[in-house]
Image (tube, grey):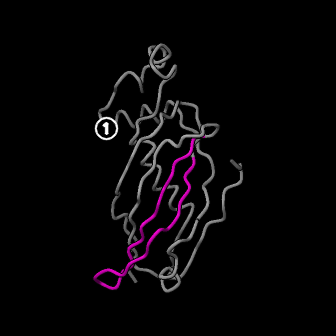
């Protein structure tokens, strides 16, 4: 794993049509803090002790509190913006997710980053482009990724 993130890929709407198969590289590392976990717990009303009680979590299955899987997944938004953008468009949409898997826990204090590959680009109604992105969330120092998902984004001229 490298500490240097990939350069952000910025393309025109027309050039985005030919991006299928493009490896966008990886983002910078982002630390998962207890404050982030607690704020997410408050926002989602998920206060399970494995996330929000560091003392109890020390004796839990992971030896420390862990981030909610959906907290890690939610980082797809800033990470996506760090990896890719399309110019000369009027609308950019996060269209959804497919095949989301939480494959390893993320301990509080860990650093995560996302790797992204545009696996497909399709034209959609309204003259837009639908991008299918294979997203993998890596944890610094761990071989197994924390999250593997297919992210769907749309761009309209």
Q: Main secondary structure of the magenta part?
A: strand
For the image shown, how many numbered marks are present on the structure?
Answer: 1
Query: Dot 1 surroundings within 10 Å: few (below 14), some, or many (20 or more)?
Result: few
Q: x%, y% of residue 10?
A: 58, 74
Compared with 38, 53 (above or below) is above
Q: Is residue 24 magenta?
A: no
Q: x%, y% of residue 154?
A: 38, 72
Q: Give the magenta range.
A: 113-139
Q: x%, y% of residue 93?
A: 37, 68
| Residue at image coords 38%, 42% | 70
| Residue at image coords 53%, 33% | 33
Q: In the visual, does 132 lie left or right of 126? A: right
Quick one: 62 or 66, which is closer to the camera? Answer: 62
Q: Secondary structure at mark 1?
A: helix
Residue that carries the numbered disc 1 in the rendered image = 44
Q: x%, y% of residue 31?
A: 58, 39
| Residue at image coords 41%, 35% | 68
């Amino acid at each position: 794993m490298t500490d240097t993130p990939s350069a952000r890929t910025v393309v025109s709407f027309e050039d985005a049509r030919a991006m299928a198969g493009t490896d966008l590289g990886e983002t910078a590392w982002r630390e998962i803090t207890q404050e982030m976990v607690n704020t997410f717990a408050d926002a989602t009303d998920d206060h399970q002790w494995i996330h929000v009680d560091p003392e109890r979590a020390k004796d839990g299955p992971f030896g420390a509190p862990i981030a909610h899987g959906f907290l890690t997944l939610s980082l797809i938004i800033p990470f996506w913006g760090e990896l890719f953008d399309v110019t000369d468009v009027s609308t950019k949409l996060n269209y959804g997710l497919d095949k989301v898997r939480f494959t390893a826990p993320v301990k509080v204090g860990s650093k995560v980053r996302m790797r992204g590959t545009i696996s497909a680009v399709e034209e959609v109604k309204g003259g837009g482009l639908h991008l299918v992105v294979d997203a993998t969330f890596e944890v610094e120092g761990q071989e197994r990724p924390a999250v593997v998902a297919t992210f769907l984004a749309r761009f309209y001229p």
